[in-house]
Image (spheres, helix red, strand yellow):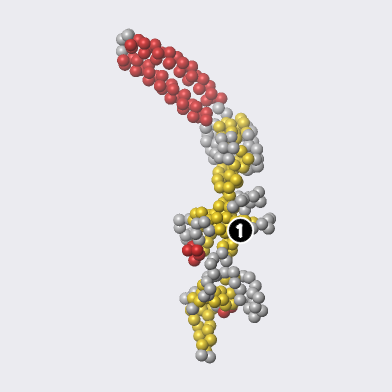
Amino acid sequence: MIEVPGSIVANEVTEIRPEVSGRIVQLNIAEGKAVGKGALLAKIYDGDLQAQLKKLQSQLAIAQTNESRASRLLEIQGISRNDYDITLLNLNNIRADIDVIKTQIYRTEIRAPFNGKLGLRNISPGAYVTPADVIATINQVSDLKLDFSVPEKYIGSIENGQLVDFTVQGSDKVFTARVYATESNVGVTNRSLLVRARVNGATGVLVPGAFAKVKLGFAPNNNALFVPSQSVVPTIKGKQVILYRGGKAVFSDVEIGARDSASGSDPRIKSRGYHFNNGHYDHQAGCQG
């Protein structure tokens, strides 16, 4: 068994920003409260856009009347087809302009992208905001994830569906999570693989961003041997142990495995140790001898 650090991650998280610049005229952010998808969180002043919309709507009414009149005249050949097409084009242009204004008005409404819990707001009513400003943060905490990194040598032991245990500060409870995805590549800086698991039965104790201690268990190797860590001699080429053969001390190359930090029951061995088998260490934790 090994222990690695991890982090609690919200199922979905995003910063709430305005799409356009303007003055906040309505602010409905209840800090620390849950909101539903589509809830109006803030409103930017849109008086000028509303005036343009009313103007275009008046023009639309006139354009519709002109198009209807031109259509009847075309039926009796009172006007040419080209004159009717110009009238119809004017009508369609006004409709398109109205759609543009409605889109601009919609962008002044800042709504919740999903069901979640709001954080602390960073602005006040009447503030002038731009798309660079973060109004608040929203986290979907109904489902939580656990991110942790596994050393490169353990990659083959991680499988989708595997259960892992973890603990967080402030709680004595042991939580579980089920692995469902891994990063597509090993990190070149730490030579570790990022693993993501879905937390089972999350409670209010778990907060996104919290530090977690993740415990990973692996199948034991019954053929492995366990020796004190003081017996392992580091060399330029790797690790060695000293074996007693025929009354002589012989250096033997070994491949080290996991180290167990638990205290052993044998009073002759007080330090950490490794497993090895046939001259090759097996990286196996959870033992002390």
Q: Position of residue 216 (x, y in %)?
A: 56, 62
Q: Position of residue 196 (x, y in %)?
A: 53, 54
- Establish if 229 lies above or below 70: below
Q: Position of residue 103 (x, y in %)?
A: 49, 29
Residue 13 falls in image quadrant: top right
Residue found at x 58% / y 34%: 39
Count up the numbered dots. 1
Q: Within 10 Å of the Cα at label 1, are there few (<14), some (14-19), or many (20+) other Cα atoms?
A: many
- Establish if 92 lies above or below 215: above
Residue found at x 58% / y 52%: 199
- Establish if 36 lies above or below 189: above
Q: In the image shown, does 221 or 286 lie closer to the viewer?
A: 221
Q: In the image shown, does 220 or 235 lie closer to the viewer?
A: 220
Residue 48 falls in image quadrant: top right
Q: Amino acid at mark 1?
A: Phe
Can you say which quadrant of the picture contains the C terminus?
bottom right
**Residue that mark 1 sits on:** 166
Q: Is residue 130 visible?
A: no
Q: In the image shown, does 251 or 134 lie closer to the viewer?
A: 251
Residue found at x 54% / y 65%: 218
